[in-house]
Image: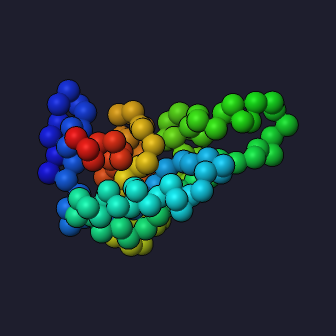
Amino acid sequence: MKLLINGMVRMQQINGKRVIISGLVSSKLNLEDHLIPIRDKIINQGGLIVGELVQRRGVSRSKKPGGSKMFDLPLSSRTYISTGKVEELKKLAKDINADIVVFINSLNNSQIQNIETLIKTKVVTLNNLDK
């Protein structure tokens, strides 16, 4: 069940839903430690975690300066994660029959709509699970 106010998801019920965790995380973080409270939150709300697809942002092979300054920026302003990772997410969601993808990053409405259109699966952000 969801409640829409001014186009924003204010509450998302994941109880009984097949959930994929996705997002973009710095390679400087210990991914396993980072995901523990996220998994707990989803499980405590009744979600069944059926997959995880997290893109790591690490040391760039680019010759352009400023790699470490870009750790907190999305890889794509349209989808937050790279287009290749979106394709992987689409395949994973279809293959495991996921009901919903929970992004660990904050996404704007446009990014949510773009990802939903591309992967054909409902997308919410972790922040919206509190509301």
Q: How is the image coloured?
A: rainbow
Furthest toward the top, the residue is 6
Residue located at (76% from left, 44% from top): 60
What x and y, as percent, mark residue 102?
Answer: 37, 53
- Res 105 → quadrant: top left
Q: Is residue 105 left or right of residue 6?
A: right
Nearest the eye: 120 or 81: 81
**From what the image shows, is residue 65 above or below residue 40?**
above
**From what the image shows, is residue 19 above or below residue 10?**
below
The answer to whether any part of residue 64 appears in the image is yes
What x and y, as percent, mark residue 32?
Answer: 54, 62
What x and y, as percent, mark residue 87?
Answer: 52, 57
Q: Is residue 11 left or right of residue 112?
A: left
Q: Is residue 60 left or right of residue 112?
A: right
What x and y, as percent, mark residue 56?
Answer: 62, 52
Quadrant where the C terminus sits is top left
Residue located at (17% from left, 31% from top): 5
Nearest the eye: 104 or 62: 104
Please give the count of numbered marks on the rendered protein.
0
Residue located at (36% from left, 45% from top): 125
The answer to whether any part of residue 83 appears in the image is no
- Res 93 → quadrant: bottom left
